[in-house]
Amino acid sequence: MKDLPTHLLLFAIVGAAIVACSLVFSEADDRKALKNLPKRLLWFFVGCGILAAILLFVERVFARVA
Amino acid sequence: MNAGKPARPRANPDLAAILTWFLPGAGHVYLGKPLFGAIAFVVVEGLYFLGLRLSDGRLFEYLDPELQGPFAGALAPEAGNLGALVWQMRSYGFGQGLPRPWPEHIHLGTWLTAISGILNACLMIRAHADARSDRRTASKGLTPDVLVFAGWLVPGLGHILQRRYRRGIAVFAILVGMLVLGTLLADGSNLDRERHFYYWAGQFLVGAPAMLLEAIHRHAPVTGEIPYVDAGLVMVCLSGLLNVLALLDVQGQAKAPVPDAAGVTNST
């Protein structure tokens, strides 16, 4: 896959921004928001990793083109 | 001792907002504030019609033929001023289909119509808030519409005006950082409404920083392949959409207090 590390880096930047802004919206208290940020980031990226693994598995098993 | 005094009938906040959406100031006329309504009408519609004049009403000629449909304007910032948008669509539509040069100040003109849409959306917030409160219960300080407009103009400014400094700085750093990074990735080609009509609409939600970058870049032509143009476009559009979340947070915090049945003021 072309430029995979660059794409992963860009995805990480955008993902971190989305998670941070969702905290701004969902958590009224700044301290709580800051405290929850690492946990939310972890959940987001672990969730994305699981989703990517499922998609790759499905693609390999049911929709392989090569 | 106001037991004998008839209570002012409560206005419907949703109706006030919807009236404003169709005709700037109409919501305030409905709320019994005709002077405010008239001033709002002149300012919002004045901006729109100045923009129309500068752009010759040719905004929607930017769209490719396959995108020209009855709902083409729904995702444009002008949709905030629905009456004017409908009027423009009926009067100018998608042009005559003949190639001709763009008016000299079309970019400035389309900025003004877009700003008019944003301004009217803020006016809707004001009409809704005014319908929910009266002088007795109105909150002190800046009104929600002013805070939301400030937050649109400079991401994070709404939070800072609410004295939520850390939050405001974080919002500014994240959103403007994404805007700048995305613009670098797209080599500035994202800053052009003609080239990317709908992505531009998302990017416009970042406010003044996006307009400033566009003014600096001056719609330079693309002369070669830009490897990460798609990533850059998505990033700047996303930064604008995330600013909507930040603006909702500002608006939620700024909502005017509402008296309950016993007349006790509750913050919602």
Image (cartoon, coloured by chain):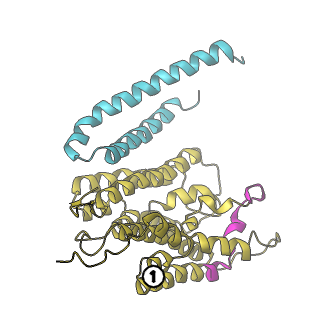
Q: Name which residue lies at 69% across and 67% down.
A: B60
Quadrant placement of the C terminus of chain B: bottom left
Q: What is the three-letter code of the residue carrying label 1?
A: Gly
* Chain drawn in yellow: B
Q: Secondary structure at mark 1?
A: helix
- At a point 42% along the width and 36% down the height, the residue shown is A12
Q: Which chain is cyan?
A: A
B58 part of magenta stretch: yes
In this view of the protein, which residue sits in the foreground, B146 or A49? B146
- Left or right of B192? Residue A22 is left
List the residue tagged with mark 1: B37
Residue B216 vs B242, above or below: the answer is: below
Q: Main secondary structure of the magenta part?
A: helix
Q: Which residues are magenta?
A: B52-69
In this view, the residue farthest toward the left is B1
Quadrant of the image containing the N terminus of chain B: bottom left
The answer to whether residue B190 is visible is no
Q: Which residue is rendered at x = 31% and y = 77% of the image? A: B6
Q: How many marks?
A: 1
Which one is nearer the viewer's eye here, B223 or B42?
Answer: B42
Residue B20 picture location, percent across and down: 50, 72
Q: Would you say B138 lies left or right of B241 here?
A: left
In the displayed structure, A2 sits above or below B8; it is: above
| Residue drawn where x is 38% and y is 69% of the image | B10
Q: Is residue B35 shown above or below B152?
A: below
Q: Position of residue B13 (x, y in %)?
A: 43, 65
